Amino acid sequence: MGTLEKSVSVSGQHALQDMIELRMYLLAQPQQTPWPMFFRGGKEHRADREPHCNPIEPSAAWELLDLQLIEATSSRTFVVSKSGYQYYEGLMNRLLA
């Protein structure tokens, strides 16, 4: 996990954090257009915090995909993968230690 931590950019970490904490998903866009994030379920989201960045730069989205921290649920929709949740939990444990 230590090598993975070093390879995830700050923008990638923020996107992953938003996707987990705010229960959001990414919608892929063609070419270099930013990828918008939407709340899963629509109604319930934390009113005390807005996403770090919406939309997400393509480089951060591709980074999360390459590291398998997010996965496709359709041809354009991406959610956090099991390894993404594990990475996030490890990151939070290290920050709180």
Image (cartoon, rainbow, N blue to C red):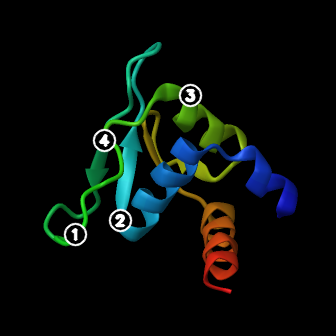
Label 2 crowding class (10 Å Cα cut-off): few <14, some 14-19, many 20+?
Answer: many
Tag of residue 23: 2
Q: Point out the tag, 2 or 4, that comes first from the N-terminus.
A: 2
Q: Residue at x 34, y 44 (%)?
A: 53
Q: Mark 1 points at which residue?
A: 45
**Counting residues from the N terminus, which is met first, the one under dot 1 or under dot 2?**
2
* Cα–Cα gap, marks 2 and 4: 13 Å
On screen, residue 17 versus residue 54, left or right, reads right
Type of amino acid at the residue the image marks with label 4: Asn
Residue 1's quadrant in the figure?
bottom right
What separation in Å lies between label 3 and label 4 (alpha carbons)? 14 Å
Which x, y percent locates residue 67?
72, 45
**Amino acid tagged 2:** Arg
Which numbered marker is on residue 59? Answer: 3
Residue hosting label 4: 54
Residue type at the position of mark 1 = His
Label 3 element class: helix
